[in-house]
């Protein structure tokens, strides 16, 4: 199980999107919704639907 970098939901292996940065670090997203919110620099703690808001 892999955790999403934005919402901390666990996702099965083979699902979701992994994005690599130029410095070699990687981010994993369970959905396009999480990826887009991450790109818009939104904070997961301020969104009710994320696990980091608790």
Image (cartoon, rainbow, N blue to C red):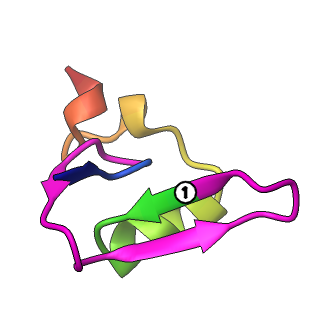
Q: Residue at x 20, y 35 (%)?
A: 51
14 within the magenta span: yes
Q: Please name whichever residue, 20 or 6, is drawn nearer the observer in this view of the structure.
A: 20
Q: Please name whichever residue, 25 or 31, is drawn nearer the observer in this view of the structure.
A: 25
Q: Is residue 31 above or below residue 11?
A: below
How many residues crowd around disc 1 within 10 Å: few (fewer than 14), some, or many (20 or more)? some
Query: Would residue 6 be found to the left or right of residue 1 on screen?
Result: right
Q: Please name whichever residue, 36 or 46, is drawn nearer the observer in this view of the structure.
A: 36
Query: Would residue 50 be found to the left or right of residue 5 on screen?
Result: left
Residue under pointer 1: 27
Q: Position of residue 6 (x, y in %)?
A: 41, 48
Q: Residue at x 16, y 52 (%)?
A: 1
Task: Using the rendered view, name the quadrant where residue 12 is placed.
Answer: bottom left
Query: Helix, strand, or loop for circle 1?
Result: strand
22 within the magenta span: yes
Which corner quadrant holds the C terminus? top left
Which portion, as a residue range, is magenta?
A: 6-26
**Which residue extends farthest right?**
22
Q: Position of residue 2 (x, y in %)?
A: 26, 52
Query: Would residue 41 be found to the left or right of residue 54 on screen?
Result: right
Task: Using the rendered view, name the quadrant where residue 14 is placed.
Answer: bottom left
The prevailing secondary structure element of the residues shown in magenta is loop
Q: Residue at x 31, y 46 (%)?
A: 7
Q: Is residue 43 above or below residue 45?
A: below
- For the image, the number of numbered tags is 1
Q: Residue at x 39, y 29 (%)?
A: 45
Task: Using the rendered view, name the quadrant where residue 30 is placed.
Answer: bottom left
Q: Position of residue 23 (x, y in %)?
A: 86, 54
């Amino acid at each position: 199980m892999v955790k999403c970098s934005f919402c901390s939901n666990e996702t099965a292996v083979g699902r979701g999107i992994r994005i690599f940065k130029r410095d070699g670090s990687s981010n994993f997203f369970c959905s396009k919704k999480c990826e887009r919110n991450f790109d818009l620099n939104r904070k997961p703690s301020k969104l009710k639907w994320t696990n980091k808001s608790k």
